[in-house]
Image (cartoon, rainbow, N blue to C red):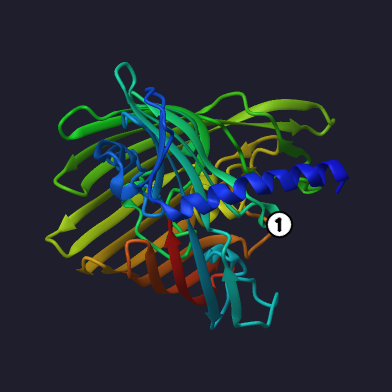
Amino acid sequence: MKPKIKFLVFLLGLGLLPCSFVAAQVNTVEVEDEAPNTVMFISRDKANKEVVKVMNETKPPYFREPGAPRFLLTDRQGKFALGIGGCLQAVAEYDFGGIAKDIDFFPSFIPAKGSTAVKNQFQMDITTSTLFLKMVGRTKKLGDIVFYTAGNFRGDNNTFQMLNCYVQFLGFTFGYSYGSFMDLAAIPATIDYAGPSGVVYYRTTQFSYRYNKAKHWSFALGVEMPSVDGTYNTSSSLKYTAESAAQRMPDFTGNVQYSWGAGSQIRAGALVRSMTYNSFNKSGDMKARSTLGWGVQLSTTFTLGSLFQVYAQGNYGKGIGQFFNDISNLSVDLVPDPDNPEKMQALPMMGWYAGLQCNLNPNVFMTATYSATRLYSDNGWPVENSDFYRYGQYFVTNIFWNATNNLQLGAEYLRGWRTGFLDNSTRHANRINVMVQYSF
């Protein structure tokens, strides 16, 4: 480090040290200024109730998403607040009787026969620890406005990566967030970061709108960034090759939802996409072609008395492999079409799950979920790999204990099954997870 840079770092340290000392000694730090733009640093418990309410009401209905952070920066009028928070999550994993070769539990990653003799595996993970910034405000013209950005350490070589980065107001969402072909509220809680194999789960850059002013009904429409994960043919036996290409159209998504009571809803969703690829004929001439992809979804979550919460989702479509948790690892949005040598095709596929949560008391709950995914053959594909993924199953049961408002402990058992296309033998794996999570 150059001398000038060292000197600047030293001065910065001298400036930050007393600031951190003061912040540690008091609950509230105020700028002695009566102007409307005065900023206050306060704890969540002493914040304006309306600000905390907006923080919580604008939280996506997903069990992994944090609520209002412990500390807030707010103006004197309490109309705008900036929250800085996150969670530290440490997980220990042990596989036995077969392994899934990933830090997350995907049935598609259960090894092929003869590829390994290892039947046990120990892993630890802290990369799902999350940091976020969230600013909320109440305005006359735009209503409640939200700016939100978050990330974890799941980038290449455990680098920090973006999870969400968007702005919301008047029902519109601009930026990078969960897609509209999802139902976050209907996803059961798991320690396993991937979750049920048949769930539709993805994030994307989007422009979307949700209307929820009706008493029980709401609907959403989205225009989303396209991305195609294909298996492109290079086999001389099919007399052609194909490769990925730039996409010419966005993905279009939408859903309609009916809600009743507290925590009960049913939703129907749909997705339509055009998938573009480059095709080369026998003479080597290149042509841009497109194949239609589509998907439909039905999901629900509802209460049974005061003790139970039900979760369920079913999905079916063609060319939507990247949206399914398990099938997304296979690059099968597009695959070769043996019956049409110069074209690619979109395979039919489905995924579903059903889960039940039991709330033993206000601080302890248990869940159990079964899920399955299926990839169907079409026009004789696959022609070369008989062990290619055809069917996957996923079972999970767990228990969570909210030891304090910020500390959560959990333990979990998982079992996965994987079956190939032509080789009908099924391989399986088992995993035990334990978790400690502290939110701030």
The mark tally for this picture is 1
Q: Looking at the image, can residue 238 be seen?
A: no
Label 1, secondary structure: give it. Answer: helix
User: Is 108 situated left or right of 217 in this image?
Assistant: right
**Snapshot quadrant of residue 387:** bottom right
Quadrant in the picture for the C terminus? bottom left
| 13 horizontally vs 300: left or right | right
Left or right of 180: which side holds 175? right
Q: Residues within 10 Å of mark 1 (few under 14, many from 20)?
A: few
Residue 152 seen anywhere in this rendered image of the structure: yes
Foreground pick, 51 / 227: 51
The answer to which of 144 and 29 lies nearer the viewer is 29
Residue 185: image location, x then y, percent: 32, 48
x then y, percent, for residue 394: 44, 66
User: Which residue is drawn at the image coordinates 63% and 28% (left, top)?
Assistant: 247
270 or 3, which lies in front? Answer: 3
Q: Mark 1 highlights which residue?
A: 157
Amino acid type, residue under disc 1 in the picture: Asn
Q: Is residue 257 above or below residue 423?
A: above
Image height of 337 relative to 396, above or below? above
